[in-house]
Image (cartoon, helix red, strand yellow):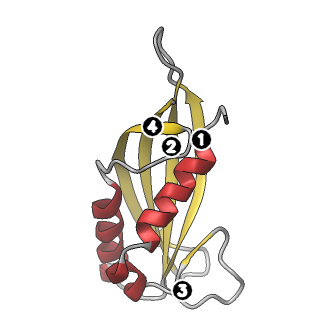
Amino acid sequence: MTILSSQSLWQAIHDRLAGDSQLMADISGIFDPAPEGQSLPYLTIGEGSARDWSAKDFTGQEHLIDIHIWSGQRGGGEIRSLADQVASLLNGQNLALAGHQLVALDFIFFENFFDGDGQVRHGILRFRARTIQD
């Protein structure tokens, strides 16, 4: 049994996103990290953190997970559309985790901006997940 549910949660999120045919038709893939020269748009499941969320009767964790959207479109329409798809696929969903149970998966925020080169638009979605150990 694993103590941290981070890997299982990351995999469940990846599988949920990769299993959606519309999202996958709109992006070139989901990566960690993206290969050099990957065609845009694509997603990366990026940084995250986990902390104790236990109580007297269960062992739990609270996770913050960032999903990054990368787009070559100058306008923000593509990023906003992809962010909406991702949020709809994850917010409030009950994903199956190995060795743990997902109690909640909630959208926290979305922002988008141009990367340092001014050519690639970058969006970040953050989700909060709470898990308990089986």
What residue did someone put label 2 on?
64
What's the CA distance linking mark 2 and mark 4?
A: 16 Å
> Label 4, label 1: how many angstroms apart (C-alpha)?
17 Å
Q: Dot 1 surroundings within 10 Å: few (below 14), some, or many (20 or more)?
A: few
Give the percent coordinates (x, y) of residue 112.
42, 67
Asked whether 36 or 62 is in front, the reply is 62
Measure the alpha-carbon separation of dots 3 and 2. 28 Å
- Numbered mark located on residue 101 in the image: 4
The first of marks 3 and 2 along the sequence is: 2
CB under 8 Å between callouts 2 and 1?
yes
First along the sequence among labels 1 and 3:
1
Q: What whole-number distance in Å separates the C-alpha atoms at marks 4 and 3?
A: 40 Å
Given the image, on which type of amino acid does mark 1 rest? Answer: Ser
Of the residues under marks 2 and 4, which one precedes in the sequence? 2
Q: Residue at x 63, y 88 (%)?
A: 38
| Element type where label 3 sits in the image | loop
Residue 15 rendering spot, x and y as whole percentages: 48, 65
Which residue is drawn at the image coordinates 27% and 62% (left, top)?
A: 88
| For marks 2 and 1 on the same chain, the one whose residue lies earlier in the sequence | 1
Going by the numbered disc 2, the residue's amino acid type is Leu
Of labels 1 and 3, the one closer to you: 1
Residue under label 3, please give it: 119
